[in-house]
Amino acid sequence: MKNIKKIAGILLVAIMIMAMTVNVFALTDQQLIDQYGDVFGEDSIQDGLDHIEDIAPGKRGLLYINGTIQGQKYRLYTIASLESWNGTTYSYKVNPKWAAFFADGAEGAAYANVDAQGYFTWKTGTDEATMKEFTQKALAYAKANYTSSNMDEAEITADGTGYARWYAKYGYHLIDSDTGTLTSLTTNDPHQVITLKNKAPTVTKTVKNGDAQGASNTASIGDTVEYTVTITAQAGAQNYILHDTMSAGLTFDADSVKVYNGSVADGNLITEGTATYSVAGGTKMGSDTEDCTFHVVFAQAFCDTLTADQKIIVTYSATLNGEAVIGGVGENNEAKITYGETSQIETAETKTNTFTFELPVFKYTGDPKTALAGATFSIKDEDGNLIKAIQTEGAADGAVEDVYLVSDDAAAVTQFTTDATGKFTVQGLAAGTYTLTEVTAPQGYNKCVDVEIEIAEDGTIDIANAEGYVEIENKSGSILPSTGGMGTTIFYAVGGLLVVVAIVFLITKKRMYYKG
């Protein structure tokens, strides 16, 4: 028999401080109904109290967990059970499953004593560091020695009510959840309500758009697209895995992955390794039903160091490739976190979109507008770089408009010529300002001046017509007709007159010379 009421209270408080994720309240029957009747339902509480009276009066209490997350699992491990008490003194016996943990020389022996008769007594400090150390070791022992078939109390998978409960024996218990909640149940009062403050981890994803970060950006084919994933971790993290899936128009750069603690700064960079994280391929993991693009798998040793709301930042990049969707829904990149005992619990997915656009050109003359073939253009971006592209569509007879796709391929060209339709289209361009220059005009026509074109963030073009084309008009030069017409006669007459005048002037000048 040991008077440990005060010690039990200290133990409870210490573990609460360590976890920083729970509030624990010990309550009588009436207090439970009065304070939590609206939360759990008075009828539900009363049914629970009646059930205890039927199965183990005076030996079990209702243990409610308030604030559960749907789909997550909650597990209760009984370390020691109350054997007897008289209101002032209490006697605990170790659970036989835990005897090996507290045996001489075992990890638990440094924290509690178990005598030859199995009586349990806490013997070490209750400071935060000690309690954190104890609970982590005890939890590791529990996971190694318990299975679903030998649990002290049934494992609970939380439903949508926001709470769960056990008919728990009076004693010391370790409670574990997929979010890492750790606490204990003492015997000072019959019932306890554990209100979870901890949250599931969350993940947000952004993409670089200029100098800013956002949910979307635009890019030209061949551009590097830079991503940032921010994980808000929680204490007691278990088996964190980042899953990332890119659509076909994005090519992942496996060497670009970097992980930071707190913020993106050289001093916060975490080195990849067995005790931190590893970058894995896309083969299914955790809750995946199909392959991803890649995974970042966080080591449990690293997860054990995480505190509530700690930020873990992952940066990486991809290249927009020739399979990119032009306009429309763009190329998406989705990320999520899975966690828990088997990494089956998952966060909501977060995603970004990368858009790329096209620049259609229509060359014409006259009114009504007549298509002009044979006009050659170049396009420069706002930095003065020539756009290079390969032809992907077109027909010699103009039945199919020529279409070019931005590319660094050796066969790429920097000049684009209108076909019989008077049109061509260059696809795979980011939003921005472009300069269209006519390099060669069709025979008999003047070259047009350079045209500045603005492609907006939504892909619209500032000077496009109703069909989306940039219209370029060519006008013919002052070319003489080859035959007939009054215009020719006038030129001949004026030319002849000038010749006559020149001859008369020359003869007159010579005569004046000889007379002189």
Image: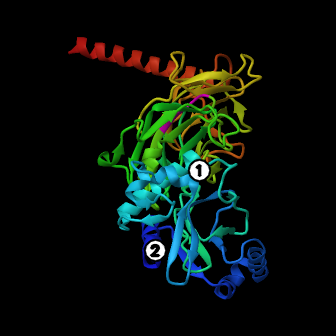
Three-letter code, disc 2: Lys
Q: Can residue 240 be seen from the camera position used here?
A: yes
Judge whether residue 451 can be spotted in this image.
no
Identity of the amino acid at label 1? Gly
Q: Earlier in the sequence, mark 2 or mark 1?
A: 2
Asked which quadrant contains residue 127, the reply is: bottom left
Which residue bears the numbered disc 2?
Answer: 2
Q: Is residue 426 magenta?
A: no
Q: Quadrant of residue 163?
A: bottom right
The location of residue 220, given as percent across then percent down, is: 53, 36
Q: Label 2 crowding class (10 Å Cα cut-off): few <14, some 14-19, many 20+?
A: few
Residues 316 and 271: in front is: 271
Residue 506 position by quadrant: top left
Q: What residue is drawn where x is 46% and y is 61%?
A: 309
User: What secondary structure is found at the residue carrying circle 2?
Assistant: loop
Residue lying farthest to the top in this orientation: 514
- Packing grade of label 1 (10 A; few <14, some 14-19, many >=20) is many
- Numbered label attached to residue 340: 1
Mark 2 to mark 1: distance in Å?
Answer: 38 Å
Residue placed at 50% from the left, 83% from the top? 88
Q: Nearer the viewer, residue 398 or 482?
A: 398
Helix, strand or loop at label 1? It is loop
Question: Over which residues does the magenta segment extend?
Answer: 317-322
Q: Position of residue 273 (x, y in %)?
A: 40, 36
Q: Is residue 142 above or below residue 55?
A: above
Q: Is residue 469 above or below residue 172?
A: above
Q: Is residue 384 left or right of residue 391?
A: left
Classify the position of the C terminus by image quarter.
Answer: top left
- The dot on residue 409 is none
Q: Nearer the viewer, residue 426 or 507?
A: 426
Determine the main secondary structure of the stretch shown in magenta: strand
Answer above or below: position of 382 versus 51.
above
